Image: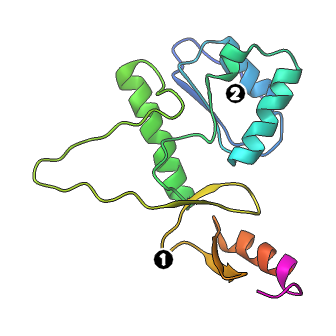
Amino acid sequence: MQGDVFEPRPGDLALVVAAHGRDELHTLRRGLEAGLPYVGLVASPKRGTGVLAELRGDGVPEEQLARIDVPAGLDIGARTPAEIALSILAKIVAVRRDGRAPDAGETRSVAVAGVAAPSAAALAIDPICGMTVAAMASTPQTTHNGETVYFCCEGCKSKFEAQHEHAGA
C-alpha cells in the first residue's frame, strides 16, 4: 500500500478488504484488475450483496464479481474476530495450494483416520446484520415469539432486544 491507495504488486496472492465502507469499491476493483488469485471482502452476506450491486452498477463484469469471496473465508461457523481471521487464512492457504479459490458453495472435507466427523451445527441468520451463524448453545441468542433467535455477537442481540422490548418476547 502506498498512502491510502492499494496497488497490487507482482506475485501478490491475496487481497482481503475489511474497510467497512472506506474505499472498498476501488480496492476490490484493483485486486480484480490485477488478477490476484484471491479477493475477499469481510462483510455480512447482506452487506456483501450491496457492495457487489454497487460494483455491478459501476460496470464490473459478472465474471469478475464472481471472483470476490464474500463473506471472506471458509465457512467454519466463525463468530469471533480470531475465528474469522483463521477462516480467511485457511481459504488463502487453499488458494495457494490449489492455485484457485474454491467456488461459492464448494465444500472440502478432510478425513482423519479413526476420528468420526462431527455433525454440522445448524445455521441461522442474524436478523440485525444478516450474518450466518452456527445455531448452538454458545451462540448469543434470545427467545422471541416462542422461537430462538441467534446473533453473531452480543451487540446485535442487544439491538434486537431493544427493538422488540415493547412488542413482548
Taking the spot 57% from the left edge, 57% from the top edge, the residue there is: 81
Name the image quarter holding residue 32.
top right
Horizontal and vertical percent position of residue 86: 46, 48
Residue sitting farthest toward the left: 114
Check the picture and name the quadrant holding the N terminus.
top right
| Disc ID at residue 1 | 2
Stretch of the chain drawn in magenta: 163-169
| Vertical placement of residue 19 versus 117, above or below | above
Horizontal and vertical percent position of residue 23: 83, 33
Question: Gap between marks 1 and 2, in whole Å?
Answer: 41 Å
Is residue 168 one of those drawn in magenta?
yes
Taking the spot 82% from the left edge, 30% from the top edge, the residue there is: 53
Mark closer to the chain start, 1 or 2: 2
Q: Amino acid at mark 1?
A: Ala
The residue wearing badge 1 is 137
| Vertical placement of residue 122 versus 9, above or below | below
Q: Which is nearer the eye, 161 or 23?
A: 161
Provide the major secondary structure of the magenta segment. Answer: loop
Is residue 23 one of those drawn in magenta?
no
Q: Which is nearer the eye, 127 or 74?
A: 127
Horizontal and vertical percent position of residue 156: 73, 69
Give the class, few, some or many, for how many residues have Cα within 10 Å of label 2's Cα (few <14, many ≥20).
Answer: few
Horizontal and vertical percent position of residue 136: 48, 71
| Disc ID at residue 10 | none
Residue 4 visible in rendering: no
SS at circle 2: loop
